[in-house]
Amino acid sequence: KMSGNHLSREFFELIKNIGESKSKQEEDRIVRSEVATLKAKLDPNFIKKNALGKTVMMSKKKQKEFLVRLMYVEMLGHDGSFGYIKAVEMVASASVAQKRLGYLVCGICLPPEHEFRFMLINQLQRDLQSSHVLETASALIALSNLATVDMIAAVSNFVIQALDHGSDMIRKKAVHALYKCYQKDPSVVTKEELVTKLRKILCDRDPGVMGASLCVIEALTRVTPMPFKDLVPSLVSILKQIIEHRLPREYDYHRMPAPWMQMSILRILRILGKADMQSSQGMYEIVGECMKKADIGINAGYAVVYECIRTITNIYPNVGLLDAAAEAISRFISSRNNNLKYLGVTGLAAIVEAHPKYATAHQLAVMDCLESTDITLAHRTLELLYRMTNPHNVEFIIEKLILFLRGGKQYHSDEHLQRSLTFKIANLAERFAPSNEWYVDTITQLLEISGNIPSCSKGLNKVGNQLMQLIAEGDGGDEDEEFDDSAELSLRRSTVNTYVSILLSSNKPILQYPDI
């Protein structure tokens, strides 16, 4: 059938018509018509009769479809509250498929304060204790979406029991449900109890359950790393097993062993090793080994390498690892793939923040990234150049940035980028200017290029005022008076020559200076 095996023609036409609607008004008209239809079909007093006049009961398949359509209506921003009770009733169905749909609709549609949520507590308790694995799994999934503070005390014990369930699927879902209970009401599921359970689950025989615990440990570590400091050896051991392909092949992704678990462990180690020499020393070897083995030329491997770089730049410094990270960054930046260039630029931004010496070797490669047609990469490169600038390279970098600002035609329509670059140049010129003459020349060029951009005018007025004050009064230094007079005279001469040449040039616009 054109409408498929599980989609009635009515539902197919609804989706088709909404997709083809030319305006929001037309879409709303179609959805309002659907709401009227569903109200009639889901009305308890609705009676359908066949050609012989006999009453026909609505099939379970139809009931399921009507609830799916109700969910679709809610997702498009219209009220479907008239059908909530049907979803609550379906949760109590003996059919697992119907029960799961009921829980799904309730989780998506019921507002947090809705009274119908409390009607689900007894059913959640029954399903959490069910011998049917799929029923228990459905309840655990639903709990993550439906739980309110008032419900936690009634269900938390059943969730804790599920952590010891014989099915690895149930144990995995129970981990996330328990974390949800802790988030909703820490007085019922305390942090100490949660940490204790997570330590045990981290040693679970099933890699999927262990991986589920990593996600929760990472979230908790971001808030308070101290309770997990002693887990560094365990995490290192787990990461070693993963990169040595000791996990079942089903956890491989394009020849990469469990890349998401690797990245999660690396992020945890990054937090635990920050400013902690002892913890960092225990992870140096495995992080370096992980980065080497992940560099196999596929995207999943590049993602793991990037996380290794981030970890290396955040833990207590190690020269060998920093050099390896800089080498990996160099390969990223020199790649033809803009996504890899972006990773390289982002990684270099992380490493130069604490270790500026690595910036010098990559200056020219980063400048090439600035000329990329990918505007996202250009934005990120600007941020990196801003961090890389110091008194030794300020002239070179600002010269390149001004050339880019003047000639980057593909970005001239991006006023935000022009504004951001203009003020970054002005800020760097003020912080690192090697001489007053250089500062005047740089700011003059900025006024020439960006003076007529509306979003820059207010900020450039302030910059222009500072420039005029410098020309009129000098830098106000405490040096020898005779030397100051000579320097200020030289500054004013060069400034006059610069501005006269601008005024005499027919191909340059008149600069827009603020009133002094």
Image (cartoon, rainbow, N blue to C red):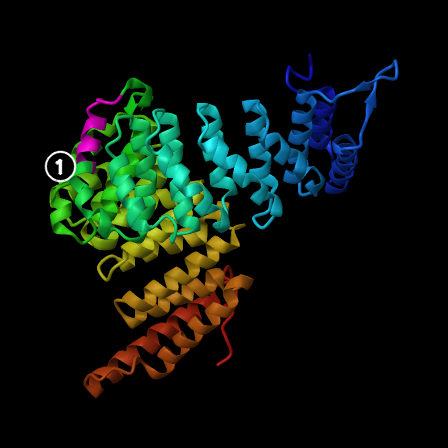
Q: Is residue 12 above or below residue 460?
A: above
Image position, residue 14 (x, y; %): 73, 28
Q: Position of residue 497 (x, y in %)?
A: 38, 72
Residue 445 figure quarter: bottom left
57, above or below 118, in the image: above
Q: Residue 9 in magenta?
A: no
In the picture, residue 246 is in which quadrant?
top left
Residue shown at 25% from the left, 22% from the top:
247
Residue 13 position in % (x across, y down) = 73, 24
Quarter containing the N terminus: top right
Q: Residue at x 25, y 37 (%)?
A: 200
Q: Locate residue 56 relative to residue 381 in the image: left or right.
A: right
Give the residue displayed 37% in from the left and 61% down from the top. 425
The count of marks equals 1
**Which sits in the foreground, 309 or 257?**
257
Left or right, residue 381 beside residue 10: left
As rendered, which of 498 and 176 lies closer to the eye? 176
Give whichever of 314, 335 is nearer the camera. Answer: 314
How crowded pointer 1 is (Cα within 10 Å; few <14, some 14-19, many 20+) is rated as few
Residue type pointed to by label 1: Glu
Q: Residue furthest bottom?
A: 481
Please indicate, yes or no, whether residue 221 appears anywhere in the rendered image: no
**Residue 334 image-quadrant placement:** top left
Magenta: predominant secondary structure element?
helix
- Asked if residue 126 can be seen in this view, the reply is yes
Residue 240 among those drawn in magenta: yes
Tell me if 261 is positioned left or right of 106 in this view. left
| Dot 1: element | helix
Residue span colored magenta: 235-247
Look at 35% across and 28% down and name the residue there. Answer: 165
Query: What residue is pinned by disc 1?
Result: 285
